[in-house]
Image (cartoon, rainbow, N blue to C red):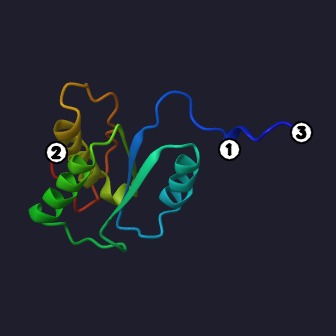
Amino acid sequence: MSPNPLDARAAGRPLRVVLVGFYNYQSHALRIFHPLLKQRGHEVHSVFFKNYFTYAEPTAKDEDLVVDLITRLKPDVVAMSVWSTYYQLAARLTRRIKAAVHPETPLDVVLQPNFDNSPFSQPI
């Protein structure tokens, strides 16, 4: 019987991965990917930014704290699990985190759907 390829360590050097969830401590995506990545030999950190669905906009200090935490972790990869309601917030934090962690690397993809009904729809 051949070994399960999901049990194999990742090729190359292990990555430092930060998984970020917005307003959802029960994020299935983070709770699934964290142990899978760890099992493959990567260093994984999960950051849960706030909890529960709300329209209360985070303060500048809240945003600064999460950007500072992720910057101090010095990740190779940052992945986010985002509900559409928080798209603008996630896009804003993505740009800030990218500028702080890997300023020399171009940001490859930022989806920009139109979520005008969101309270976070201010320009980013």
Label whose residue precedes the other's in the sequence (3 or 2): 3
Q: What is the C-alpha distance between the residues marked 3 and 2?
A: 52 Å
Q: Amino acid at mark 3?
A: Met
Q: Amino acid at mark 1?
A: Asp
Label 1 SS: helix
Determine whether 115 is above or below 47 in the image: above
Residue under numbered circle 3: 1
Observer able to see residue 121: no
Point 28% across, 51% down: residue: 90
Label 2 SS: loop
Number of the label disc, if any, that sits on residue 51: none
Q: Amino acid at mark 2?
A: Ile
Point 28% across, 60% down: residue: 118
Q: Position of residue 96 (x, y in %)?
A: 18, 44
Label whose residue precedes the other's in the sequence (2 or 1): 1
Label whose residue precedes the other's in the sequence (3 or 1): 3
Q: Nearer the viewer, residue 12 or 34?
A: 12
Residue under numbered circle 2: 124
Circle 1 Cα neighbour tier, 10 Å, few/some/many (<14 / 14–19 / ≥20): few
**112 sits left or right of 26 in the view:** left
Mark 2 or mark 1, which is nearer to you? 1
**22 sits left or right of 35 in the view:** left
Residue under numbered circle 1: 7
Observer able to see residue 84: yes
Mark 3 or mark 2, which is nearer to you? 3
Q: What is the C-alpha distance between the residues marked 2 and 1?
A: 40 Å
Q: Quadrant of residue 55?
A: bottom left
Query: Could you tell me which quadrant the N terminus lies in?
Result: top right
Q: Position of residue 101 (x, y in %)?
A: 22, 39
Point 34% across, 73% down: residue: 51
Label 3 SS: loop
